[in-house]
Image: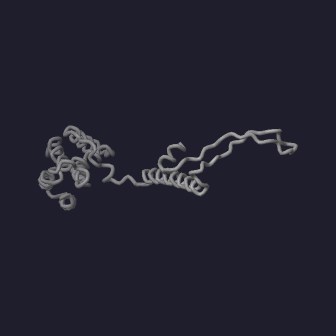
Amino acid sequence: MAAGWSATLGVTAPMFQFQTKASTGEPNRKKSETVLTPVVPRRVGMNQFATIALLTMEFRMRVRCLSACVVFLSLACPAQDWQECKPTGDFSFNDVKAAVHRVTSSGMYSGWDEKTFFRSGDLVAVAVLKTMDDSEMASPQTAKWVLLVIRSAFACPQYCVKVTDDRRPRISLLLLKHLDEITRGKMHAEIEEVKQYIQQQARKAN
């Protein structure tokens, strides 16, 4: 270790040697003792030796401080939605259809389903049309779940949706218009709110 530092700094590192000291005559000391005594070569003065020690200490402190900062930031940074749904992997269309069917039929909404919708964008509307018929969507309770999944599909299109075309709500807007027709305008306000929301989110993604 000392040789490495001396090569880096261009000086000769201090060496140590064993020396035997004679007894001082004190009653509690042995006649002789072996001690480790630093021997400073001529090329390195005491001031240079102190500088090397300070540099070594400062380097170690900086490494420890940097490591502590990295650990702290990794633990302290909140798990934002846009950080959690980054497109590290793709969902197949079957996965999206399964999530739509699970949510609309059971009335239960899990984090896995949410992540699936976040990453799928306009593909969710296609999955709704492939999974449900008009008689099912016409039910007010089911229509609310349809609006929920369509809204979730455009929660963060600029960060979550990997396919650029799926960031635009073309099929979703057609689905909302059709949903307004088959529910006979009973959910017009809710449908308009979702329509405005996904259009606003899509503009951010462009």
Residue at 33% across, 49% down: 84
Q: Quadrant of residue 100?
A: top left
- Percent across and percent down for residue 186 are 18, 58
Q: Horizontally, is 4 left or right of 118 in the view? A: right
Q: Nearer the viewer, residue 8 or 61?
A: 8
Direction right: furthest residue: 27
Kindly indicate the quadrant of the structure image that contains residue 91: top left
Name above or below for residue 105 compared with residue 63.
Answer: above
Tell which of 7 and 148 is nearer to you: 7
- 38, 108: nearer the viewer: 38
Q: Position of residue 104 (x, y in %)?
A: 25, 44
In the rendered view, does 21 fall on the left or right side of 184? right
Residue 20 visible in the displayed image: yes
Whole-percent x and y of residue 140?
A: 22, 51
* Residue positioned most to the front: 42
- How does the figure colour the protein chain or chains? one colour
Residue shown at 38%/52% (left/top)?
79
Q: Which residue is at 77% across, 39% downward?
A: 33
Residue 57 percent location from the top left of the image:
55, 53
Left or right for 98, reference 24: left
The C terminus: image quadrant: bottom left
Q: Can residue 189 be seen from the camera position used here?
A: no
Q: In the picture shown, does residue 196 fall above or below 15?
A: below
- The answer to whether 195 is drawn above or below residue 86 in the figure is below
Q: Which residue occupies 31% across, 43% down?
A: 112
Relative depth, front residue between 111 and 19: 19
Exactly how many numbered labels are in the figure?
A: 0
